[in-house]
Amino acid sequence: MLSSPPLSLYIHLPWCVAKCPYCDFNSHALKGELPEERYVDALLADLEVDLPRVWGRPVVSVFLGGGTPSLFSGVAIDRLLAGVRARLQLAPNAEITMEANPGTVEHDRFEAYRAAGVNRISLGVQTFDSDKLKILGRIHSGAEAEKAIEAVKAAGFERFNLDLMWALPEQSVEQAVDDVERALGFGPRHLSHYQLTLEPNTVFAKHPPPLPDEDSMIAMQEACAERLDRAGLHAYEISAWAEPGQESIHNLNYWRFGDYLGIGAGAHAKLTLPAEERIIRTRRKSHPRPYLKALEDGSFVAEEKSISESELAFEYFLNRFRLDEPVPLAEFEDRTGLHSGALADRMGRALELGLVEATDPAFERSTVLQRTERGQRYLNDLQALFL
Ligand SMILES: C[S@@+](CC[C@H](N)C(=O)[O-])C[C@H]1O[C@@H](n2cnc3c(N)ncnc32)[C@H](O)[C@@H]1O
Ligand code: SF4
């Protein structure tokens, strides 16, 4: 039987000062003036679309992602969050995260965001090496990244995340570790450590930069992990490190196959509808122009579909095994509406291959799975078992 999991809200703000050559997010270089008032109007009208489907459910987290949300003024973010609160019931300690680019912010802005209700900042540092930042097409230097972190702290944000990327063009192991050391110097309680990937349809995919070789990448990952561990951060997800208790509520809900509303250009949503015995995914119109135009007739949604039974198990485990935590099969059953028994052979195979451990080999509702270290190393193989 399906039951409603925790509910989050994702809000996409699609503009950036410039498009980074490695980025395949739905983000667009801003030409001309930022239409922030109209966009906030559109977001609030968009939110109305799915409201009847989540009536009465508290929202545990809000994530303002992009693009570069910090292009928006404090006034605009304040109106947006006030509008959200007027339409949805936020849980008492709801986590409200906003992504920020160090090249777009100054001290006053962070104070305004905090006053608007944002209680967590995720800052896209990437690296402190100014030469590498230039190669990455970033609009800020290492010194500006440091200044931005100081500004986040000075504005009183106790919870903030720093995004770092590693395996950068011509990066040495020492340089990758140096980035981690410098980030740790600011005392972050959460750090995202992403391996640079060459995504299709990006400038980097077309003109690949010279990336470190396989051996250096392995050495980098191990050396950085050791340093992060020593600083008291643990990898609760493949790329996410946090002090115990400082994990991102929003990301955890996503990886645990929770529900999320998604508003804004190109935003995705996943909603469980127990009364209809189905789970749906929706996607908003991707390009900001047609999205803004939808303000006239409310046609924000580009696509809506139910997740089929055959996709459900794969999607659940795809996300779930990214996390380094036990997987109670009761949760699997409640969140997918499927019976664990139907997957016993696949789970048995994962057990045989040493990719998971299980409290018992019956794979019933009471069974709890745990990804092993081997399962983490061969995550793709583990996920593929549920395809
Ligand atoms: C939407 S961006 C964050 C906020 C803001 N737009 C910025 O870049 O400062 C999310 C993060 O994903 C990471 N990222 C983006 N593209 C990536 C890629 N191709 N490989 C690895 N990490 C990537 C970056 O660390 C980036 O900060
Ligand atoms: S600033 Fe962030 S979202 Fe914008 S293009 Fe660069 S990485 Fe992508």
Image (tube, rainbow, N blue to C red):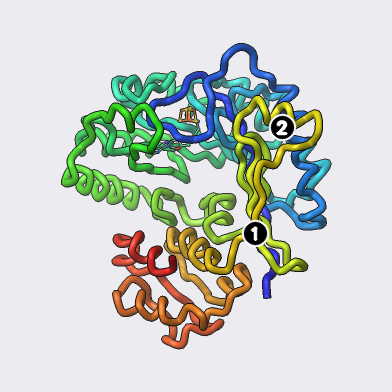
Residue 322, compared with residue 354, is above or below; it is above
Residue 367 point in image, percent of width and height: 50, 81
* Position above or below: 261 against 198: below
Q: Residues within 10 Å of mark 1 (few under 14, many from 20)?
A: some
Q: Is residue 101 above or below residue 60?
A: above
From the viewer's perspective, is 180 left or right of 318? left
Near mark 2 (Cα within 10 A), the count class, few <14, some 14-19 or many ≥20, is some
- Disc 2 marks which residue? 116
What's under tag 2, amino acid-wise? Ala
Query: Relative to the observer, which residue lies in front, 305 or 375?
Result: 305
Residue 266 screen position, x and y as percent? 60, 38
For residue 44, which quarter of the picture? Answer: top right
Residue lying at 29% horizontally and 66% vertically, measured from the top left: 374
Quarter of the rendering occupied by the C terminus: bottom left
SS at badge 2:
helix
As measured in the structure, the alpha-carbon distance from the residue carrying label 2 to the one carrying label 1 is 35 Å
Residue 13 visible, this orientation: yes
Percent position of residue 2, x then y: 67, 71
Dot 1 lies on which element? strand
Q: Position of residue 87 (x, y in %)?
A: 82, 44
Q: Is residue 79 visible?
A: no
Residue type for callout 1: Ser
Horizontally, residue 217 falls left or right of residue 309, namely left
| 331 in relation to 80, above or below | below
Q: Which residue is mark 1?
A: 306
Comes first in the chain, label 2 or label 1: 2
What residue is at 64 percent from the left and 24 percent from the top?
72
Mark 1 within 8 Å of ligand 1, using the beta carbon: no
Residue at screen point 38% across, 39% down: 184
The N terminus, quarter of image = bottom right
